[in-house]
Amino acid sequence: MPDPAATPPQDPPPDLRLVGPAVAAWVAAALALGASPFAVTLVCTVALAMVTVLLARHRTSATAVALAAGLLCACAGATAGALAGTAAHRGPLPQLARRAAEVTLEATVTGDPRTARAGSTVVLEADATRLDGPAGTAALRTPVLVLADRHSWLDLLPSTRLRLTGRLTLPTRGGSADRIAAVVRVAGQEPPHVIAPPTALQRAAARLRSGLRRATDGLAPDARALLPGLVVGDTSRIPADLDDAFRATDLTHLLAVSGGNFTILLALLIGPSHLSARAERRGLAARLGLPLRLTALLGGALSLGFVVVCRPDPSVLRAAACGLITLLALATGRRRSLLPALAAAVLLLVLFDPWLARSYGFLLSVLATAALLTLAPRWSEALQRRGVRPRLAEALAAAGAAQAVCGPVIALLAAQVSLVAVPCNLLSEPAVAAATVLGFAAMAAAPVALPAAKCLAWLAGWPASWTAVVARTGAALPGAALPWPAGWPGCLLLAAVTAAAVLAARRVRLLRRPWVCAGLALLLLLAVVRPAPLTRVVTGWPPSGWRLAACDVGQGDALVLAAGEGTAVVVDAGPDPHAVDGCLRGLQVERVPLLVLSHFHADHVDGLPGVLHGRAVGMIETTPFARPPGRAAFVRRAAAQAGVPVAEGAAGERRRLGDLSWEVLWPPPAGTSAAAEDGPNDASLVLLVRTAGLTLLLLGDLEPPAQQALVEAYPGLPPVDVLKVAHHGSAHQDAQLLRALHPRLALISVGAHNRYGHPAAATVAALKAQGAAVLRTDTDGAVAVTGSATAVTAGRGRRRRTGARCRGCVAWCKTDSWIPPVSMPTSAASAFNARPPPMRRRCASSNSGTSSPCRSRTCRSIWERRSCWRARPSWRRWCRPGAAASATSSTAPSPTC
């Protein structure tokens, strides 16, 4: 038996020789892009000196050679990164952008134009090649981002040369966006001034892409939108809701053309890669009898055509580079291994374009490929040893490995973890392969035989539609996505959790314990489905008998008024469709007879698609003042697409839906109040609501002038139990209105760490001085108010309750102006103008908010027993009706309030 000490040192495994240098070059390039040239030069000099010493002293050591190779590649990456970072920001454009100068440029388009998701602005990337500015004419080559307002800019192709005039501004920094030196806002509504057409290659690629779009014109909406995206990455037709579904299920990689598409094409040509050089090789080339070198040349041409047609996105470049290296090995007869090919592709691409080192798309593509090459085979073998069929084991291992490695990066970008990503990827994978092959065939046939292309596209539409069904169904599940900390802390936390879970599974040999696996699968299923009774028991949300909920949607408003089982009236939709949709799902709201949009600012209406998603919405009611017009048009378009009528609210309108009733107090008709026409905020719909004995006032975003006009218009405005504070608790509040309302509970819907300073400390202090309990969505999360004037918070891990205040136990009289026995219309807007029956006078207790008919003009005195309890963090006394405190209350030292 040989002595281990006498055994010569082994070389590193061949599959790992290039991994270290590739990673070193990647990290060095990413750091050098934002570093000063002097610092990069100094570090590279020290690294080269270390390489010299290592090779001089340990020339025969494999470890020293590997370390020297890593240092040399790191120096090369740092040098390339420093040069690229300096080149991107040298020249006069950054200085002119700081002064917001107006210039005339000649630029070459480098990417496909696209429409910004919010609005109609066209965005395209270009290289500025000539500047006509205040200081004269200069030749340059600087990357810029062009913004234009005409849709004719969408027809431009890469390599087109333009002449444009616009104002320069500095771009937002961060990640790969740092490569943009300036943003050019094109002046006016002028069409693009083309001074040189695109190249013949780009025109040919455009004909192929447009042929695929023509071939899919007659398909179902989802297939028509998805098929160009699955085949060539053309996502221009994909609607926002389908894009959101793909994001929620982690299927967006299907729309970013990557190695999967290229692997399918290459496999059609050369067959399985491990058989490509053997006598039993397969594929189209083998059937045609093509020699290996000619097959490699055809594969290279296919790779270049794939990059041109699908555009040189990071994932496309990575896939093409790996394919070219594999084809080179095939042509030369060298040993082929996919992991060295991946490492070599990363090294070459980072040195060629250092900005890829900061691209999250490139990172995800490389991580997914590495997981498929390293983790997936081991996991597949483990599953097969436990009796899983080989094809199923390979699919499960591939999906699980890719999700485990890419999940932390996705969490960094999306601040969520998809719980349905693996099953959705498994269900969509066979359909994507079929749709890709048929889609490429349709694209190739479209220029010569459009009817045949349409037939092929029709066949490809079936698997594409199935993929859309999988994405929409997975995204609609209540627990499809788990909120997760954003940024690098969340990324590192999820990476640690994933690694710990994998190690624990190996330690306890999880695959040998079927009952444990079944239990974990059941827990995951319950977390995804989230049955309402179980969710309420576990989380306490939503509380039983809730009447009002303020959703935590960030810097915006979204209020929900309960109107029956699974039914609610929604007031405002917030700025984010995902947030309001998640809130409504958490509240188990399936039907929305009325959606009220107080005014047309983005923080109140941009979440409209989230309310419409998967729910029956009867009507949308808006303010009659359509300002700003862009967001008002957005609301009308979204409502028209969903088939929901839109009506305008008016002061004096009174409605009832079950035991929920409300009156519109503001704004008055156009031309009758200067305060209402002062701006969009002052045109907010103001609702006075009664539900389950509670009185609520929802002020929208009214400013002090409109608040003062509201007090003057309603001098007898009664005190309220719950006040939705105007304009997210800003400092602009009318003290007279707050004194008149005297709320028991003040709700402030506001985003955490917002740049407006909301809520203002003075506003919070004024509300507390009135005796109100103040709850904020930025610190307390979503807030629900029950019929017993109890507020319960969700999302921050605690419950806070507010009871009725002591007001001397004297009843007060008020006029009950909301008793119209009219059911809520769901389709006809004209029903809103029905005249209500005469008003009745009622009495209400100042302590409980309950009311009873008045027997005379003098209200009866109502005496009730009360209990005092503590509200953290200090001892405070509260009163509420009832013979005893609830189980969550603690008796105060004093027996009286």
Image (cartoon, rainbow, N blue to C red):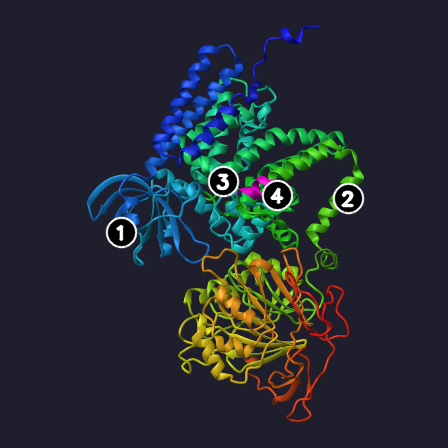
Residue furthest to the front: 894
Closer to the eye: label 1 or 4: 1
In the rendered image, residue 66, in percent from the top left (x then y), is placed at: 50, 18
Circle nearer the N terminus (4, 3): 3
Gap between marks 1 and 3 measured at Cα: 32 Å
Query: For the residue marked with disc 2, what is the amino acid?
Result: Gly
Mark seen at residue 360:
3
Circle nearer the N terminus (1, 3): 1
On the question of residue 477 being in view, the answer is yes
Gap between marks 4 and 3 measured at Cα: 26 Å
Q: Name the one closer to the observer, 56 or 233.
A: 56
Residue that carries the numbered disc 1 in the rendered image: 101
Task: Assign a secondary structure to mark 4.
Answer: helix
In the rendered image, residue 537, in percent from the top left (x then y), is placed at: 74, 58
Mark 2 neighbour class, 10 Å CA radius: few under 14, some 14 to 19, many 20 or more: few
Residue that carries the numbered disc 4 in the rendered image: 431
Mark seen at residue 429:
none
Residue furthest to the right: 515
